[in-house]
Amino acid sequence: MSASGSVRPGWSLRTKLLAIVFVGAVLPLATLGLWLAQNTRRSAEASLRARLDSTLSRAAQQVGVSWITHRSGLFDLVQDSTLASTLAHGRLLAQPTRLGVAPNGFAALRAATHLIVVRDAAGRAKWVVGADETGAPILLAAGDSLRIGDGTASDGFETNVPVRRGIGGEILGTVDARFRIASLLQGWTGGVAGASAVLAVVDRATGAITAPLPFDASLLRAGRFRWGGDDWLTESRIMDDPSLEIVAAAPLTSFMEPFDRAARTGAIALAVVTVAAFILVILLTRRVTHSLVALAAAADAVAAGDLDRQVEARAGDEVGRLAAAFNLMVDSLRKTLAQLSQRQAVAAVGEFASALAHEIRNPLSALRINLQHVEERLEAQPSLREPVQYALRDIARLESTVAGALRLARTGTMSMGAVILGDVLDAVSRLARTEATRRRVSLDLAATAPMALRGNAAALEQLFLNLLLNAVEATPAGGLVGVTVEPLVGEVCVGVWDTGGGFSPEAWDRAFEPFFTTKQEGTGLGLSVAKRLVTAHGGRITVDSRPGRTTVSVWLPLIEMRTSAVRPATVVKATLGV
Ligand code: ADP
């Protein structure tokens, strides 16, 4: 079953991230915007109401002051002695009868009223108070049918004051005045909120109103109403003396304009921030999710067997690290699998080589013994003896090759003892010189101080021979190959260098794999055997290669000369892992 087989389909990571941003940022921002807009409207309304309220307070004050002035004018009138005696007589003493009130004081009262009527004690309208050409108050005859307010405008309210015979005396009649409501706000400069705002004074008894309104007066009681495509707010103040109601109304729109503008600016800023945040998140998540999608696709490909699949790991964040780790993991998986199959191949070849060696060694020994007998008998015939000697030399070489193959193929052991490094290197350079001369490559071999190693001389010879032959083969005619020996603390570093073209990129990766070769007649075993031999001697091997200078360095542990030189070679076992 594939790994993806158990994965339930669901939202993609990107959708989830966008949902998180939407729920975590966009939604709260939008809610905040709505709340701000609502709040702005509410506070604008509250502010307008506060202004209407303060207007009403000032208007009530003005009405109160006006009312006191008008009343005092009225009191002056009822205290007029001519008026009292005229009422006592029940008829006008002169036509018209001039009253004693000063023309100046009366002028204000007259301007504030529609009509002033004098009634007798029975409530009959007897006379009207007017003014002569000098503005002085006079009593004029009025018919019985006269009703106060008859023929006058509706914007008035009535009030009456008794006329007494002397102070505290009997009531002779009343003076009824119908005041102009507008007179109460005469000279009003308090202003109302907004150009189209309205301030009205209503007579509570009759519902009469100061001025004609553009809308139905009953709307003023609503607190809020809609008229002329606008929302209006109203506030009112009740007065007991005089019994009036002052109402102020103002349209909300013009007042709201600055608040609305601020709210609009806020909403636009919020929208811009929200959109920018969204775009930013989309861009960021695209990067992350793109990498994760690539990673998931690569993982699927690897699961399907494509071990060459790699992902881009440029970002330095967690996703980048994950991608790098994924690449590393696939790389190591590939190498492990390759090593596994390589090991299996090596093991199979080893088994085959050891079986073959066993099969060859015995007949080869018998062949050698027989030929040695023949050689001994042919002492007198040198011409026949020579080919036999050649055959014997070939057999010796074959025997040594078979022995070497056996030693390497087997997971076996080799005997270890004190070995003088100089001797090993001398033997190796003698062997390599023939090949170097044939290829016209010069050898530059360092003279070595006496140094002892614990190891196997034949194995060490093979190790350095492999390196030296590789160097010679990699160097073009006329080039140089050399060996350096550098004693260090407790170990020695032997460097085999050449002036060839260096390791090819592929060889650089795989040179130590068994059977890897770039040569037509190569076995691909030289470096892998060398590495195993170095490991068996407790050392390490490194390569430094560039065109014109390649050095393969081998570090091997040293033993002290004094003891090793006198002590006979002890044989220890070292494992030669294949
Ligand atoms: P072989 O010599 O049989 O090819 P090795 O294991 O000794 O096997 O070497 C493996 C490969 O490493 C060689 O085929 C060659 O490509 C590369 N190599 C080894 N030594 C050198 C060197 N000194 N310079 C360049 N390439 C080398």
Image (tube, helix red, strand yellow):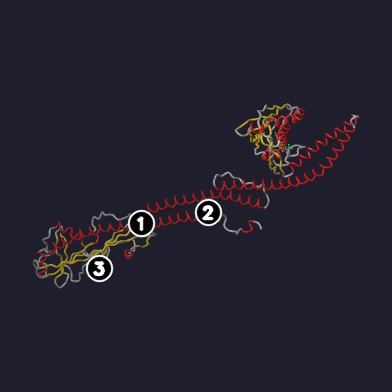
- For the residue marked with disc 3, what is the amino acid? Ala
- For residue 295, above or below residue 418: below
Crowd around label 3: few <14 · some 14–19 · many ≥20 (10 Å): few
- For residue 447, above or below residue 50: above
The residue to which callout 3 is attached is 205
Q: Position of residue 383 (x, y in %)?
A: 90, 29
- Element at badge 3? loop
- Element at badge 1? helix
Looking at marks 2 and 3 on the same chain, the residue that comes earlier in the sequence is marked by 2
Q: Quadrant of residue 65?
A: bottom left
- Asked if labels 2 and 1 touch by Cβ distance under 8 angstroms, the answer is no
Residue 507 appears in view: no
Looking at the image, residue 298 sits to the left or right of residue 50; the answer is right
Residue 396 appears in view: yes
Q: Quadrant of residue 424?
A: top right
Looking at the image, residue 514 sits to the left or right of residue 67; the answer is right
Q: Position of residue 448 (x, y in %)?
A: 67, 28
Looking at the image, residue 323 sits to the left or right of residue 410; the answer is left
Q: Position of residue 19 (x, y in %)?
A: 52, 56
The residue to which callout 1 is attached is 43
The number of numbered badges drawn on the structure is: 3
**Residue 18, label in figure:** 2
